[in-house]
Amino acid sequence: MIFLRKIDPKRDVGKEYLKWMNNYEVFKYTEQKNTKHSLSDIRKFVKQKNISKNEFLYGIFLKNSKSHIGNIKLGPNNYIHKSAYISYFIGDKKLWNKGYTTKAIKLIIGVAKTKKIKKLKAGIYEINRGSEKVLTRNGFKKEGILKSEVQFKDKRYNVYIFGKLIV
């Protein structure tokens, strides 16, 4: 179905990736939604994550075609408390609702285990039902609510914090 690997800034960051990063629909429930990205900015970001000891960025790739369809990030990591955040996206909207994000989260849980992480967290806008579904399918529980934390289309929304203990 899919596999994760580090992103090669030269091979994997191109016009399609740039299109995803500047697509409002892909990022409307994130802090990236109003950011205009360039190829050089994206490549710089990928290079920084590839050398980071605290954040680990992986591309989500289809096994059959080896097509890059999105990203998932583990971090920032708190090594003292053995906890980390995750964030993710699927860039091509035609590939939404096909189980790829659910599987990518399962895979990143495995990566977290190799890094001795015991607790994963994710923050989502309350209206992001897709993210809520993939997190709960992976055993994440809603642990907190940041009341009226974000503004989206002239209305205030809560941010839900989801967590999962991993063993």
Image (cartoon, rainbow, N blue to C red):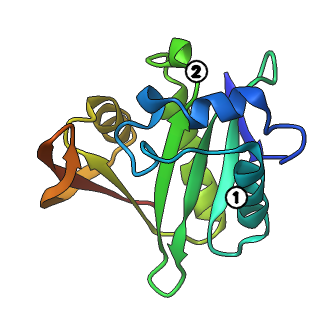
Depth-wise, is mark 1 or mark 2 nearer the camera?
A: 1
Q: Position of residue 62 (x, y in %)?
A: 72, 23
Crowd around label 2: few <14 · some 14–19 · many ≥20 (10 Å)? some
Mark 1 → mark 2, Cα distance in angstroms: 20 Å
Q: Position of residue 148 (x, y in %)?
A: 11, 56
The front one of 51 and 140 is 51
Query: Most extreme residue toward the right, as rendered?
Result: 10
Res. 92 mark: 2
Query: Residue 64 lies in what quarter of the image?
Result: top right
Q: Is residue 23 left or right of residue 150?
A: right
Q: Position of residue 165 (x, y in %)?
A: 38, 62
Among the two numbered marks 1 and 2 on one chain, the one whose residue lies closer to the N terminus: 1
Residue at 70% x, 49% y is 42
Res. 25 mark: none
Residue for badge 1: 45
Can you see residue 156?
yes
Residue at 30% x, 48% y is 124
